[in-house]
Image (cartoon, helix red, strand yellow):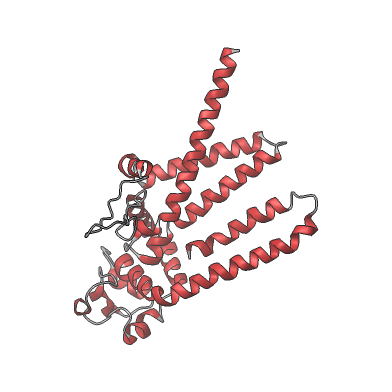
Amino acid sequence: MQCFSALPLIFFIIIRITLLRENKISIKKPIILLSLILIFYVGGIYYEVNSSCGIDTQYNSVFYGILKNSKTPVEDLRGLGLPDDMVFEAGKHAYLPKEDYKKYTPGSPFTINEFNEKISNLKLLKFYLLKPHRLIDGMEYTASQAFNTEGFLGKYEKSSISEYTYKLNRFTLWSNYRNSYLPKSLFFLIIFYLLIISVSILEYIRKKGDTSCRIRIELLWVIIFIGLLQFPMPYIGNGQADTGKQLFLFNYTFDITFLVACTWIFHKFSKFGIKNKV
């Protein structure tokens, strides 16, 4: 879903660059073909994954997201059009032993009929739009899970040792620093992106006659907005389950944005130093 939702932004930058070419007709067919391949490839993977994992993520989004720590769980269920007795499963995710569920066991025919068939991403989105304070609370939690790409599901070292460990410290200097020292707060992320976007807009205006520079700034905007689009999706679509793992694309785009910002600052200081020497 994260990759599929990013497609419009990808198409924007492809079309934007294509329109700059002098011979637009010769590249029109390859671009259309490329776009169709991307749509069917990403859409096909989303459909295949959602048909199996979608049942669990829907369960997590409500019981381990909306209902978890909710002060008005019954009211929340009614707002989603779900039965009141689902409140007894509040705070549970989809990966517990079957005996831990009182009535609504994830993946059972009864639960699929009474829950999965009645919930959708649009209903979840509507719930958070009508209760923005709940979305902000969720984003605070999501921010606390950002910058951590050391998960239990990956980064294992292939060797002959008898016991594997996920604590592999090879090529992890930046990720360890980011996870240990960057503030994991919604306030920090808001300030960071506001600064980057504000400065880039000023640069975009200043570089009015420089098409090449403007395209690079537009590409930066695409990367930024792909990352920002990913940020709320893990919590809305999967509650508090696997949040860090599902923020991988956000962390990737954050790293690119951070690197661009550092490069721009270094470039400005270099130019300032050269002027002073002259």
Q: Is residue 242 visible?
A: yes
Residue occupying the far top of the picture: 278
Is 276 situated above or below 214?
above
- Measured from the top left, where is residue 157 in percent x and y? 31, 54
- Measured from the top left, where is residue 85 in percent x and y? 26, 80
- Measured from the top left, where is residue 238 in percent x and y? 37, 66
Residue occupying the far left of the picture: 99
- Measured from the top left, where is residue 57 in percent x and y? 37, 70
Residue at x 52%, y 54% (from the top left corner): 226
Q: In the image, 7: left or right of 73? A: right
Nearer to us in this view, 60 or 171? 171
User: Which quadrant of the figure has residue 76?
Assistant: bottom left
Q: How many marks?
A: 0
Is 135 situated above or below 168?
below
Q: In the image, 37: left or right of 240? A: right
Is 103 situated above or below 23?
below
Nearer to us in this view, 2 or 202? 2
Is 91 situated above or below 13?
below
User: Which quadrant of the figure has residue 275?
Assistant: top right
Image quadrant occupied by the C terminus: top right
Residue at x 32%, y 86% (from the top left corner): 110
Nearer to us in this view, 272 or 71? 272
Q: In the image, 228: left or right of 154? A: right
User: Which quadrant of the figure has residue 141?
Assistant: bottom left
Q: Is residue 195 visible?
A: no
